[in-house]
Structures are given as structure tokens and as C-alpha cells.
């Protein structure tokens, strides 16, 4: 961790960084969800997504998981879906 922080300071000029090392991306994602989401929160996921990511939200108590479409050629999310969701609430 210290070596990564030093690299960020020296090469990237990032002085207020934190580094977390995990066993893999799934663990990192779960840690992120546990940090940012509370029971009853709403989230938007875009297909395709990993089932483990969906499960992370469920186990955190996120009650509204909106799954949106992506462009099948580019896999870019359909941002219009997010805008519509915001306007509906």
C-alpha cells in the first residue's frame, strides 16, 4: 500500500489518495457498495453486468435496483434512462 501511495504522489501528483488492496475485483466492488450504499438506497446498473455486482446491492439492502440497457455495439450506458428516472422521482 505504501509503495502504491508513493507512486501516486510521485508520478501522478495525487497527495490525498487512499489505497485499498483486495483479493480481486469482486471484493473491491463489495467494499465500494458497503461504503457508498445504505439499506433503502436506489441504484442504476447497466447491462451487461456481473451477477455478483447485483448481489452486492441486494445484500446491502438496496431496495430499488434499476437495470438499464446499453448500446449493444459500444456497451455505452443509455444515459437517457437515468435522466428519465430522475425526472420521475
Image (tube, grey):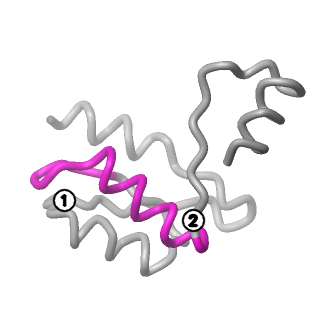
Q: Position of residue 31 (x, y in %)?
A: 40, 58
- Percent of width and height locating residue 82: 38, 42
Question: In terms of image quadrants, where is residue 56?
Answer: bottom left
* Label 2 to label 1: alpha-carbon separation: 23 Å
Residue 26: horizontal and vertical position, in percent? 51, 72
Of tags 2 and 1, which is closer to the observer? 2
**The C terminus - image quarter:** top left
Mark 2 — residue? Answer: 22
Q: Secondary structure at mark 2?
A: loop
Determine if the magenta segment contains residue 69. Answer: no
Q: Nearer the viewer, residue 79 or 45?
A: 45
Q: Is residue 40 above or below residue 25?
A: above
Residue range in magenta is 23-43
Taking the view exactly as shown, the residue that stands out farthest to the front is 2
Query: In the shown orientation, is residue 89 left or right of residue 6?
Result: left
Q: Residue furthest right?
A: 11
Q: Is residue 52 left or right of residue 70?
A: left
Q: Residues within 10 Å of mark 1 (few under 14, many from 20)?
A: some
Residue indicated by mark 1: 62
> Which residue is outermost to the bottom?
51
The residue nearer to you, when weighing 14 against 25, is 14
Magenta span contains residue 32: yes
Q: Look at 42% across and 53% down and name the residue there.
A: 32
24 relative position to 52: left or right = right
Question: Is 56 placed left or right of 21 in the picture?
Answer: left
Give the class, few, some or many, for how many residues have Cα within 10 Å of label 2's Cα (few <14, many ≥20). Answer: few
Q: Position of residue 46 (x, y in %)?
A: 48, 60
Q: Residue at x 52, y 49 (%)?
A: 78
Q: How many numbered markers are drawn?
A: 2
Amino acid at each position: 500500500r505504501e509503495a502504491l501511495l508513493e507512486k501516486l504522489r510521485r508520478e501522478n501528483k495525487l497527495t490525498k489518495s487512499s489505497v485499498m488492496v483486495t483479493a480481486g475485483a469482486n471484493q473491491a466492488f463489495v467494499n465500494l457498495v458497503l461504503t457508498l450504499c445504505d439499506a433503502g438506497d436506489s441504484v442504476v446498473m447497466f447491462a451487461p453486468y456481473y451477477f455478483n455486482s447485483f448481489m452486492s446491492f441486494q445484500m446491502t439492502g438496496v431496495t430499488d435496483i434499476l437495470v438499464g440497457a446499453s448500446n449493444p455495439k459500444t456497451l455505452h450506458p443509455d444515459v437517457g434512462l437515468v435522466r428519465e428516472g430522475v425526472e420521475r422521482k
